[in-house]
Amino acid sequence: MIEVVIDSIRISLVSQHRIVMLKEMGSERQLPIWIGPCEADAITIELQDVKVARPLTQDLLKNVIAVMGGRVSHVLVKELDDGIFHASLFIDIKGELKEIDCRPSDAIALAVRVKVPIFVAEAVMDEAGVEPEQDIQEQAKPQEEEAGPENLDIFSSFVDTLDFDDFEE
């Protein structure tokens, strides 16, 4: 199992869905998981410590587990089957660990509320994990270094030929 943290929640430009980016601890590798807007809001509300007037579904589940004498141990994104992620809640009830199937978005929303680790199965991370793209500035930097002063002479010559009076209104 690979421990991850929530790196960000991103908005899709092509649909109403959101993407939660889970970042591998000690690495830059990330796992993008498409989630619904309600689940994204439930995660964001907790991460930003926003107070709500009434409990959300994940708050209800947290409260029910506690009242029943259980404690969430951790959550696991365990499988990717035909493009669909599967997760499990692990609940400790009097020393016995119970595994409960759920959607990753619900598992993550509950995990942030009860402050437990989020894990991803190695096979899932290997199959669907991505490395973030290099920042545009980082990509441009080596090119700038290669473009020494001798390569800027052409540009400088061009600028010297400009008549800036032509640009006045």
Image (spheres, rainbow, N blue to C red):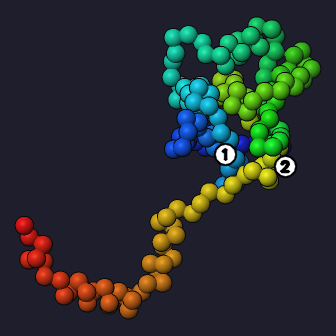
Q: Give the label on residue 93, or none.
A: none
* Residue furthest out toward the right: 96
Residue 5 against residue 102 in the figure, above or below: below
Say what secondary structure mark 1 lies in. strand
Residue 110 position by quadrant: top right
> Residue 24, can we see it?
yes
Residue that badge 1 annotates: 32
Residue shown at the point (12%, 72%) measured from the top left? 167
> Residue 119, can we see it?
no
Residue shown at the point (56%, 10%) measured from the top left? 54
Front-most of 1 and 165?
165
Q: Give the label on residue 123, or none.
A: 2
- Residue 65: percent from left, percent from top: 77, 13
Q: Which of marks 1 and 2 is nearer the N terminus?
A: 1
- Residue 161: percent from left, percent from top: 19, 88
Query: On the picture, is 95 further left or further right than 76?
Result: right
* Residue furthest out toward the top: 67
